[in-house]
Amino acid sequence: METLIISIPENKSGLVKQLLKELGVTMKTTTSGKVSNYKQKLTEVAVWNEKDLDSLKDGHKAFSDLKSEQW
């Protein structure tokens, strides 16, 4: 038996899977674990409010106002 990995456009996935099943191909999907990991990472993304952004803007302004010393 040979293992083959292919990338299929989502809109053609159903058709390709149906044809392969009719030919007796067994399919093993591994994307479900990856998707749930991705969703978990997205839930851990921090949310910044306006007060947080104001602090960053103040810091940026302070750095941009710095002048190099003359020797």
Image: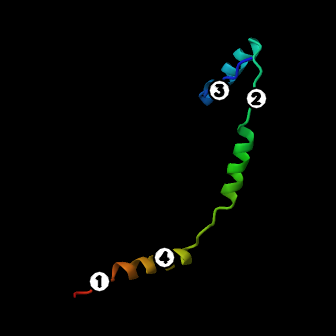
Report x, y in % for residue 49. 58, 72
| Label 3 residue SS | loop
The crowding category of the residue bearing disc 4, from other C-alpha atoms within 10 Å (few below 14, some 14 to 19, many at least 20), is few
Residue 14 percent coordinates (x, y): 69, 24
Q: Earlier in the sequence, mark 1 or mark 2?
A: 2
Q: Position of residue 46 (x, y in %)?
A: 63, 66
Q: Earlier in the sequence, mark 4 or mark 2?
A: 2
Q: Quadrant of residue 62?
A: bottom left
Q: Are marks 4 and 3 in contact (CB under 8 Å)?
A: no
Q: Is residue 12 left or right of residue 63?
A: right
Q: Tell me the residue that label 4 is attached to.
A: 56
Front tag of 3 and 1: 3
Amino acid, disc 3: Ile
Q: In what element is the residue under mark 2? A: loop
Identify which residue is drawn at 71% across, 38% down. 31
> Is the N terminus in the top left, top right, bottom left or bottom right quadrant?
top right
Quadrant in which the C terminus appears: bottom left
C-alpha gap between disc 3 and disc 2: 10 Å
Give the residue pinned by disc 3. 5
Residue under label 2 = 28
Spatial distance from mark 1 to mark 4, Cα to Cα?
19 Å
The front one of 38 and 68 is 68
